């Protein structure tokens, strides 16, 4: 009769193994939470910077006292709740892209605010309107209604060239 090999029996401590498994899960969860917190913090940091820059740009654009500061201005009479005004604003911003800050400035007269409403009344125009001013603050042209960026860029270029010629 052949001899049978005895198998080595490995005795394990099941409660210790369970404790190690629970510890690993807790570590994984903790590392996952740290990762998520880090991602959220990074997102808030970048998002916070974007929000601050947008607020600054909005304040700068709303400063209608800049009309007549030596730089021609495009002023949009704007209702932020109006989809047509928002579409015009996108087109204007696209048309303004080739111009430097010293060539042409974009301003917004928000008719939901007192200063914007007063500006609108002073010039007797509806919203969805662009008013173009030379560097001395003299009104040059009024564009009413929606316009495409390519057309607006040509009009803005003519306005900026008037400044360069004077």
Image (tube, rainbow, N blue to C red):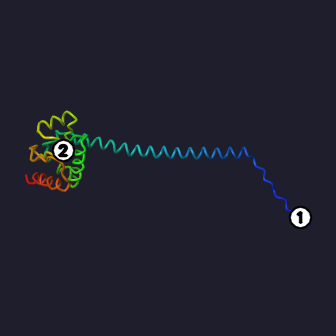
Q: Residue at x 85, y 62 (%)?
A: 5
Residue furthest left as drawn:
166
Q: Looking at the picture, how far across and down is residue 91, in whole percent?
A: 22, 51
- Label 1 Cα crowd, 10 Å radius (few <14 / some 14-19 / many 20+): few
Residue furthest bottom as drawn:
1
* 115 over 132 or under it: above or below: above
Give the mark toward the camera: 1 or 2.
2
Q: Quadrant of residue 67?
A: top left
Q: In front: 144, or 18?
A: 144
Relative horizontal placement of residue 6, taking residue 124 as reference (left or right): right
Which badge, 1 or 2, is on the more N-terminal residue?
1
Question: In the drawing, what numbered circle is on residue 134?
Answer: none
Q: Quadrant of residue 66?
A: top left
- Number of numbered discs present? 2
Relative horizontal placement of residue 49, taking residue 129 as reference (left or right): right
Which quarter of the rendered picture does the N terminus lie within?
A: bottom right
Q: Looking at the picture, how far across and down is residue 68, in whole percent?
A: 12, 43
Which residue matches tag 1? Answer: 3
Residues tagged 1 and 2 counted as in contact (Cβ below 8 A): no
Q: Looking at the picture, how far across and down is residue 38, in whole percent?
A: 47, 45
Residue furthest right as drawn:
1
Label 1 element class = loop
Q: Residue at x 8, y 54 (%)?
A: 165
- Label 2 Cα crowd, 10 Å radius (few <14 / some 14-19 / many 20+): many
Q: Looking at the picture, how far across and down is residue 119, in whole percent?
A: 15, 37
Q: Residue at x 69, y 45 (%)?
A: 18
Which residue matches tag 2? Answer: 128
Label 2 element class = loop
Cα distance between the residues tagged 1 and 2: 99 Å
Residue furthest top as drawn:
114
């Amino acid at each position: 009769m052949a001899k049978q090999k005895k198998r080595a029996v490995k005795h394990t401590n099941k409660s210790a193994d369970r404790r190690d498994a629970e510890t690993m899960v807790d570590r994984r969860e903790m590392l996952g939470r740290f990762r998520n917190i880090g991602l959220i913090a990074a997102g808030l940091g970048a998002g916070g910077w974007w929000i601050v820059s947008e607020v600054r740009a909005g304040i700068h654009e709303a400063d209608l006292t800049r009309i007549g500061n030596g730089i021609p201005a495009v002023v949009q009479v704007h209702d932020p709740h109006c989809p047509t005004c928002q579409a015009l604003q996108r087109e204007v911003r696209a048309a303004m892209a080739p111009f430097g800050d010293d060539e042409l400035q974009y301003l917004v007269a928000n008719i939901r605010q007192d200063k914007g409403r007063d500006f609108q009344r002073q010039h007797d125009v509806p919203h969805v309107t662009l008013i173009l001013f030379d560097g001395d603050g003299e009104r040059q042209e009024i564009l009413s209604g929606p316009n495409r960026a390519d057309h607006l860029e040509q009009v803005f270029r003519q306005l900026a060239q008037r400044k360069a010629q004077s």
